[in-house]
Amino acid sequence: MKVIRLLALPALLVLAWWAVGGATFYLPGPAAVGRAFAETWFSERLTEDVLPSVGRLLAGYAVAGLLGVGLGVPIGLSRRLRATLEPVLEFFRAIPPPVLVPLIMLLAGIDTPMKVLVIVSGCLWPILLNTVEGVRALDEVLADTCRMYGVRGASRMRRFVLRGASPQIMTGLRQALSIGIILMVISEMFASSSGLGFTIVLFQRQFQIAEMWSGILLLGLLGLGLSALFRVVERRVLAWYHGGGAARA
């Protein structure tokens, strides 16, 4: 039954697509898009466009994760530091990352560093702010218990602070993943010669409509795969939180 529930809506969407597909030049049917998908992405474009895009996405996501958690923990622990930085953080968070693309291009050029920085500029904020909130919400009773039993330094950070804030941190990482995919595509639409974003725009400009739709389909499948992988990691990290067994310290 669970498999049926999971596949029911995708099957209905494909049937609806099959029913209306081909009605116009700009909406090819599933068969045409499927052929274009196989011909386009099971070729040299896999190594020239898809894998470099995924590599840039993962690099930017990893840097944003390290910066977000690394900065969010001390800000969350220090009330004075938080009060000082909060207005600045809210100011920069309000700036849409795509607006920064021209500035980042001036500072970092148009190659891979620019694309990674664009991804970092958007993924950082949900991770940072959720980490701050997670650390702020730590149980004061547990904090007192750690002090009473002499749990300090790296052990306190690992066993109490990071573990206690991990549900919020994982929420920020989940939000950042979808933002990262969007910014990966946007960054490749500017002064680029490879990548998924560049290729989809190229197909659109050349009126290769089925190929364009196949690229959009590939982005959806990429997001679905990364989301499924993230859920596996999240279940392991938060097993203690969801009652899935005691996680090892």
Image (spheres, grey):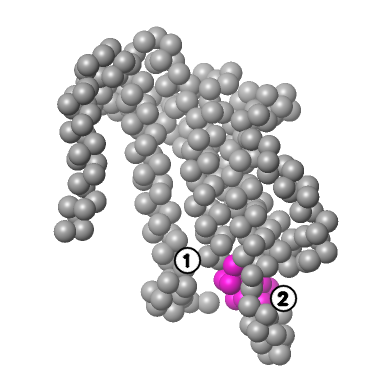
Q: Residue at x 79, y 66 (%)?
A: 79
- Residue at image mark 1: 237
In percent of width and height, residue 100 lies at 67, 30
> Whole-Å distance between the Cαs marked 1 and 2?
22 Å
**Image side of residue 83 versus residue 126, left or right:** right
Q: Residues within 10 Å of mark 2 (few under 14, many from 20)?
A: few
Work out which quarter of the rendered image holds the N terminus and state it: bottom left
Disc 2 marks a residue whose amino acid type is Gly
Q: Residue at x 28, y 12 (%)?
A: 25
Quadrant housing residue 103: top right
Residue at image location 37% in from the left, 37% down from the top: 220
Of callouts 1 and 2, which one flags the residue occurring earlier in the amino acid sequence? 2
Marks 1,2: beta carbons within 8 A: no
Looking at the magenta stretch, what is its main secondary structure?
Answer: helix
Q: Amino acid at mark 1?
A: Val
Q: Is residue 191 above or below residue 154?
A: above
Is residue 9 shown in magenta?
no
SS label for mark 2: helix
Q: Is residue 236 above or below residue 41?
A: below
Instruction: Give how far across and how far down residue 235 sits, in percent.
Output: 41, 64
Please give the label number shown on residue 153: 2
Q: Residue 58: percent from the left, percent from the top? A: 51, 43
| Region in magenta | 154-165
